[in-house]
Amino acid sequence: MVPFNYLIAKDADEAVALSIRNIKSKLIAGGTNLIDLMKENVSKPDTVIDINKIDSLSAITELSEGGLRLGALAKNADTAYDNRVQKRYPLLSDAILAGASAQLRNMASNGGNLLQRTRCYYFYDTATPCNKRDPGTGCSARGGYNRIHAILGASESCIAVFPSDMCVALSALDARINIQSTFGCRVIDFRDFHRLPGDSPELDNHLQHGELITSIDLPNESFDLNHSYLKLRDRSSYAFALVSVATAFKIEDGLIMDARLALGGVAHKPWRNTEAEDYMKGKAPNVQTFAEASKINLSDAKGYEHNRFKIELAKRAIIRNCLTAANKNS
Amino acid sequence: MSIIERKYFGQALNRVDGYAKVTGEAKYAAEFNVPELLYGYIINSTITRGEIKSIETETALDIEGVVEIFTYQNRPDTAWLDLKYSDMDAPPGVPFKPLHNNKIRFNGQPIALVVAESFELARYAATLVKFVYEIDLHETELQTNLTSARKPKKGLASILKPGPPKAKGNAEEAFNNALLKASGKFVHGMEHHNPIEMFASTVVYGKDGKLKIYDKTQGAINSQLYVANVFGKAYKNIRVISHFVGGAFGSGLRPQYQLFLAVMASLALKRSVRVSMNRHQMFTFGHRPATVQNTRFSSDKDGMIQSLYHDAAGETSRFEDYSEIVVNWSNMIYPSENVELGYKLVPLDVASPLDMRAPGGVTGLHPIECTIDMLAYEARIDPVKFRLINYSSFDNSSGKPWSSKELKECFRQAAKKFGWEKRNADPRSMTREGKLIGWGMAAGIWEALQLPARAEALLKTDGKLIVSSATADIGTGTYTIMTQIAADCMGMDIADVEFRLGDSDMPVAPIQGGSLTSATIGMAVQTACLGLQTALIKQAKKIKPEQFRGKNREDLEFMGGNLRIRGSSDHALSLPEIVSSTGKKEMICRNTSLPRVLKQRKYNRSAHSAVFVEVEVDEELGLAKVSRMVSAIAAGKIINPKTARSQILGGMVWGISKALHEESIMDHRFGRIINSNLGEYHIPVNADINELEVIFVNEEDTIVNDLQIKGIGEIGMVGVPPAIANAIFHATGRRFYDLPIKLDKIMAEPRMKG
């Protein structure tokens, strides 16, 4: 770990001002990932700006147009166990609780969850090449041990996956992200927040330096009846997803009126394929429909030496999880 | 000899060290703070094989508070004789010598120690030290180097780890001619111990140049000998203390490199120094070696075994021949006239492997017990019945009788508890809530050893007894059971008895490992207490000659803190009274206990186990869960059923880990382990562990030792991985030969419903 300055921001305006002033700074909330990265010398900020004192960012509040606003500093655990979230957005609650461990969820903030970095082994090992850590050095995972890596949307330069569970549900629910900077505020659709690696895998998302995530908005449409989150991993807790699936349906008269399907553990971002979702609309919620949707979803999938199994696993997980969601509350 | 009434022996007492441990009173090696302590941070090689060409330390040394950076170029002189670097658990070969020269022999090899006024500073300065290497080609993969397998070298360590017995009959011919056959190739990768407490040494530099060292070790005296020999010091000037160990599982059987580095820095700087490892560094020394095994077993149509063939090739370093007893077991457990067993090593560019819980046994029993299961299926005989058909009433490999063996009773009790009779033997025949259910079982064996050891019994005028021996308690319960043994022996209230350990100033004990501590130290404690009794009786005769003179030991008894005539409370002398009468503050007896080798060697002395497992398999998604496990253990007398149960539970959990989760993954291009942290080195979490049940089967054994104890450190684990693999076969109809059996293996080649 490299020595750094530690600053405390008292409000959001100060946080973005300090951030802009210190070009090599990082904001810290729960610190459950950043501190690891600093200890591993992967992240070497010269200034760490603590935003935990900004009380206004930790609330969960109703939106006037319906829907819920999740403060960026609300803890993952507080969010998952919030009555309104549990009742109206059970998919999100389930996804959060499938992630990490109880202790980590108690520390981790909602904004931080969006910004956590890949758990690719090589990204963390400074003795090996990694384009995400040190652009231009090469990708160790492509020709190395890539069991946990991407099968969708990867590039020559990076096959890492984004590790969050929470974000898979947020993607499925079409959440929006509120961002503040010294220039004002902007809103990004969740699906457009994270990016694919392309030629610049060092960038995980479209957040600019000096920008602060203030909250996440959940739209009114809550999919509280037919939903399911399935996470497949190497042990029952405290393990990242090999494949995870968030499914939500609106079913009327035995037909799927609306469908949401997002995958985790398979790409550089939570994977939404609207073509597969559109295919399911108007169809009966049965194995045939879901099998076809899973094929559409994985049609461009590409496996590497150790992760080819994920393609078939993802298909099966989609079918299984869609069936669970469709049969819920029936 | 029935002079000792066993009041506490067999009682499920709480741990005597439990309070200290849960309140944080118990201090571990890295927690002893002394004034002006310096902190060392270790730098490890990032290449696997080659040479250090140059080192740049100036930038780091320029930082205020950085005291020194030790590398091979400037390290102080240490012993030049290889033998001096040896230790109680050193395999044949030349031990690794930290900072010895510029050669890199494995990835993660320590190559420098940065010493600074704070840990954080040392860690930061370490990032500024630059090495230029000349890289050589390396080989780290066992499976692609099997052609270089060769027989292990022999050495002192071979006494406790004999090679396979000579072949008998003709296993190949018998196999070819047999009606029923089963064979397999079994592979598991490297595994690391990963105790929660990481290795650390705090070296307190005395004004007189004497060193007091708080070290994480399974043998304080082992560390003391190593330090004294390597640094040319008198034993009396080196004291090693290790009162509490936060798990070790074998990793503390050898002094680790942080000890060398901390002592080196302390002596060179004449300052107190602490060096502690981080989690990554815990993957840079001993480990369970990757092993490839082949079995070929055969039987006649009635299930009588006709031949046993088992070979194994384990990985070792290029400088030491670490070996394990992997293949010696099959013919001990199962009679056969045609047996061929082979064991070889493949030297690679890795750190030397090291004993890790049930070393060799848990490795070898997996293929043995899986192949037996396969053979039982070939013969269409229930796997328990198959084992009873082939039940050996003596050890067929040596021809020796068992000192005791209640394995049959283990099968009976565990099967009953498990409900085995309800099993449908057909694979894929049992289901529950859409999941395949598998019931599998396996047997286990582990040797019951005893070594010589010394202990001291000290009785004070306040009536407190302090018994000590330089052994360790790595969480096993040594503190508690030795207190029980001593209290019984002296007929005292257990509250008046204290057992101490983990200090090289104490009487000599061997390293704590191999399931031998209970027997070894238990007998030393008893021997010391019996010696103390003799002294007390002698003194009693001086105080009350008319009552005690002429009485033999059998006529007297120690009871309720008194010495008295057997069966009579008249003329009882309290123990404090006897001690006081000497005019001294205490009476001390130091004694050595020696195993009765002549008697013992005529027998095979082993603990046995029977493990029954239920798995739930979601084949489509590849998920396997151990929903239930029953383990029956026959290991002589159980001193404390509570601590013993915990040890067996630990073994069962680790067995689940080995079968389903655990592996150190090496990227052989780099020779680096890439999952060297507890986030990615998967061991089970609570949610993976379901119903576990432990049964202790009573066993009389007058051969092993007077206490009739066999040791239970390893027996709880050995049979678990094969029982799980066999249960998964029963559930899915498919054999998985390689461990761990992960999701991607199970979900492959699906047999979808219908």
Image (cartoon, rainbow, N blue to C red):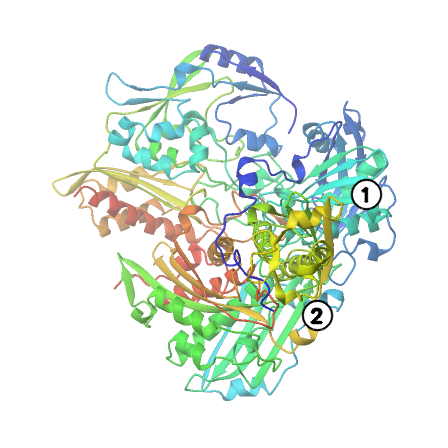
Chain letter of the residue carrying label 2: B
The answer to whether B528 appears left or right of B688 in the picture is right
User: Who's the residue at 33% across and 30% down the image?
Assistant: A81
User: Who's the residue at 72% across and 50% down the image?
Assistant: B587
User: Who's the residue at 83% across and 39% down the image?
Assistant: B210
Q: Position of residue B536 (x, y in %)?
A: 69, 55
- Please tell me in which quadrant of the rendered image residue B439 appears: bottom left
- Please tell me in which quadrant of the rendered image residue B90 appears: bottom right
The quarter of the image holding the C terminus of chain B is bottom left
Q: Position of residue B469 (x, y in %)?
A: 69, 52
Chain letter of the residue carrying label 1: B
Asked if both marks, 1 and 2, belong to the same chain, the answer given is: yes
Q: Which one is in front, B517 or A16?
A: B517
Q: Position of residue B473 (x, y in %)?
A: 61, 50
Label 1 sits on residue: B53
- What residue type is disc 2 on? Arg
Label 2 sits on residue: B150
